[in-house]
Amino acid sequence: MKVFFSAAEASSDTHAAEALKHLAKLCEKRGVELDAFGVGGVKLRAAGLRVLFPAEELLAMGFVEVVSRLPKIRRELRSLTESLNREKPDAA
């Protein structure tokens, strides 16, 4: 089973990591192979996420920081879209 996760800030990283841990246990119990991939922070990566790129690369605060990072953010989002089209997850 392929599952896409997107957790770009601290609290969503924490909740998604817990969800991934539970999902991994359930899949293991049922003999289903789990491939969890996407964007996540430290906790989600520690839970076993196959990272397309770290969530920290998307984080920006303030107008100047966001504007200065827009080209990189757009590239990462385009790459993410391409990955989703190629990987075709069963759930997100």
Image: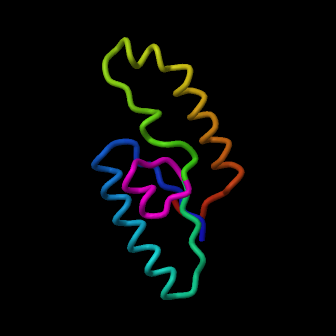
Q: Position of residue 17 (x, y in %)?
A: 37, 61
**Most distant residue in the right direction:** 86
Residue drawn at the location 50% of the way across and 59% of the way down: 49
**Most distant residue in the top direction:** 64
- Front-lying residue, 8 or 81: 8
Q: Position of residue 41 (x, y in %)?
A: 40, 48
56 relative to 1 in the view: left or right: left
Residue drawn at the location 58% of the way across and 47% of the way down: 52
Residue drawn at the location 56% of the way across and 34% of the way down: 77
Residue drawn at the location 64% of the way across and 37% of the way down: 79
90 relative to 68 in the view: left or right: right
Q: Quadrant of residue 22?
A: bottom left
Q: Is residue 30 magenta?
A: no
User: Is 28 located above or below residue 38 in the figure?
Assistant: below
Q: Quadrant of the N terminus?
A: bottom right
User: Is 63 located above or below residue 85 in the figure?
Assistant: above
Highlighted magenta segment, given as a residue range: 38-50
Q: Position of residue 47 (x, y in %)?
A: 42, 63
Q: What color scheme is it? A: rainbow
Q: Position of residue 46 (x, y in %)?
A: 42, 59
